[in-house]
Image: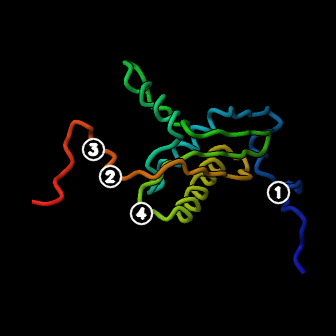
Amino acid sequence: MTSTQPPTSAAGGVASRSESLTSSQGKTTIADTVVSKIAGIAAHEVNGVYALGGGASRAVGALRERFPGGSVNHAQGVSVEVGETQAAVDIDIVTEYGVSITDLAAGLRRNVMAAIERMTGLEVTEVNITVHDVHFAEDDRSDDQPAPARVQ
């Protein structure tokens, strides 16, 4: 029969992921924006993710990048809830056409959870993914270019 007791630390106390966030020397608080940015960067690393965010947030992000001094918002399409020891993540994505969405979602969850847990020590309780669109390579063609002839 296996034990259901939590693991203990070397000092004999109950071990937890938040041990490094609170110590006798003080407490570390991680802002929601930090967790959002980590999740956004980790999501972009996964093959098959074309973009983060729904249509409106991507349009606003594209405008922001065009202004001088504008930067990429790595947290675009990501919302988080961060507690003292846990975090929950919601991610809105656009996938590449042809990618298995179920495999993509599993890989995305793994990568986002690993990055947040490794960098912050927070336990990620869930990563919810909403697929807003599928990107086709033909979508990149500008409206100024004529469509290629179907016959010659």
- Tell whether label 2 touches label 3 (CB within 8 Å): no
> How far is the residue under mark 3 from the one under mark 4?
18 Å
> Residue 123 has which mark?
none
Q: Position of residue 112 (x, y in %)?
A: 59, 51
> How far is the residue under mark 1 from the one under mark 4?
46 Å
The residue singled out by tag 3 in the image is 141
| Residue ID at (21%, 48%) | 147
User: In the rendered image, which quarter is residue 144 located in?
Assistant: top left
Give the mark nearer the N terminus: 3 vs 1.
1
- Tell whether label 4 touches label 3 (CB within 8 Å): no
> How far is the residue under mark 3 from the one under mark 1?
57 Å
Badge 4 amino acid: Gly
The residue singled out by tag 1 in the image is 9
- Between 59 and 152, which is closer to the camera in this rendering? 152
> How far is the residue under mark 3 from the one under mark 2?
8 Å
Direction from residue 85 to residue 137 in the image, left or right: left
Extreme residue toward the front, this view? 151
Badge 3 amino acid: Arg
Dot 3 falls on a residue whose secondary structure is loop
> How far is the residue under mark 1 from the one under mark 2?
52 Å
The residue singled out by tag 4 in the image is 98
| Residue ID at (42%, 25%) | 63
The residue singled out by tag 2 in the image is 137
| Residue ID at (34%, 46%) | 139
Direction from residue 19 to residue 134 in the image, left or right: left
> How far is the residue under mark 2 from the one under mark 4?
11 Å
Q: Position of residue 76 (x, y in %)?
A: 54, 36
Badge 2 amino acid: Ala
Give the mark nearer the N terminus: 3 vs 4.
4
- Tell whether label 4 touches label 1 (CB within 8 Å): no
Viewer-side label of 3, 1: 3
